[in-house]
């Protein structure tokens, strides 16, 4: 539908089947996310479409069964690139409002400032996403459609080799030294 509504559904995968579990506390679009099935993390996002309105500064933590409130982002943000664990996460770039290159780090309780993305020109938004850990992160810029990549060491972002086909709204996974980027819109 237009505008597209956010979805609060959560499904877990056990290697062969999907199971509906406890929904997130609010419908979300374009939230930062990372962690594991027993220690998941959602950061910011938007409650409305388009993502530039209804920006959220909330954090939700998942323990494998329930969602609880975490720390509050320094400023509402959506469409960023995120990675790490529930107690050592990063959320870089995105829209807050206006595109930003800043990174915020989460220790499981509080947020602090991290290094700025090194993408250069253009809005550093994360339709394509990020992977890895706080001290070994990888971010692939996805808006506008680009093929730019940055690597994070927990302090600063560095320009990394670009991938082959410019795109946005794709999927990514793996680690910063063994990654995959798939699908999307060119």
Image (tube, rainbow, N blue to C red):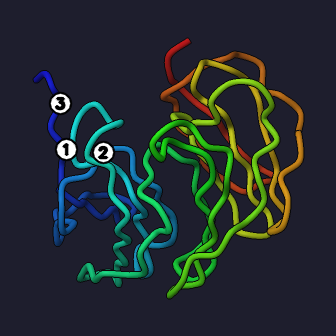
Residue bearing mark 3: 4
Q: Quick one: 92 or 179, which is closer to the camera?
A: 92
Mark 3 in CB contact with mark 1 (< 8 angstroms):
yes
Mark 3: few/some/many CA within 10 Å (<14, 14-19, 20+): few
Residue located at (68% from left, 45% from top):
101
Counting labels gives 3
* Location of residue 82 by image quarter: bottom right
Residue bearing mark 1: 6
Residue located at (50% from left, 16% from top):
185
Q: Quadrant of the N terminus?
A: top left
Q: Quick one: 19 or 64, which is closer to the camera?
A: 64
Q: Quick one: 165 or 16, which is closer to the camera?
A: 165
Mark 2: few/some/many CA within 10 Å (<14, 14-19, 20+): many
Q: Where 70 sits versus 131, above or below?
A: below
**Secondary structure state at the residue bearing disc 2:** loop
Residue located at (38% from left, 63% from top):
57
Separation of disc 3 and disc 1 at Cα?
Answer: 7 Å
Question: Which residue is farthest bottom?
Answer: 109
Left or right for 66, reference 77: left
Residue bearing mark 2: 29
Separation of disc 3 and disc 2 at Cα?
Answer: 9 Å
Task: Find residue 130 and report its horizontal and vertical position in percent.
Answer: 62, 49
**Secondary structure state at the residue bearing disc 1:** loop
Q: Quick one: 170 or 111, which is closer to the camera?
A: 111
Task: Find residue 40 and report its horizontal and vertical position in percent.
Answer: 43, 73
Mark 1 in CB contact with mark 2 (< 8 angstroms):
yes
**Secondary structure state at the residue bearing disc 3:** loop
Task: Find residue 154 and report its horizontal and vertical position in percent.
Answer: 80, 68
């Amino acid at each position: 539908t237009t505008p597209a509504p956010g979805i609060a559904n959560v499904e877990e995968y056990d290697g062969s089947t999907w199971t509906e579990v406890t929904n997130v506390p609010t419908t979300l679009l374009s939230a930062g996310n990372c962690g594991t099935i027993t220690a998941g993390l959602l950061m910011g996002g938007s409650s409305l479409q388009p993502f530039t309105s209804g920006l959220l500064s909330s954090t939700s933590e998942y323990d494998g069964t329930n969602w609880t409130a975490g720390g509050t982002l320094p400023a509402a943000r959506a469409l960023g690139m995120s990675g790490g664990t529930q107690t050592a996460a990063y959320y870089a770039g995105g829209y807050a409002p206006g595109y930003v290159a800043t990174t915020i780090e989460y220790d499981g309780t509080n947020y602090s400032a991290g290094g700025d993305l090194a993408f250069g020109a253009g809005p550093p938004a994360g339709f394509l996403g990020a992977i890895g850990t706080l001290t070994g992160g990888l971010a692939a810029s996805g808006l506008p459609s680009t093929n730019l990549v940055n690597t994070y060491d927990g302090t600063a972002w560095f320009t990394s080799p670009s991938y082959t086909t410019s795109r946005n709204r794709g999927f990514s996974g793996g680690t910063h030294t063994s990654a995959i980027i798939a699908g999307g819109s060119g």
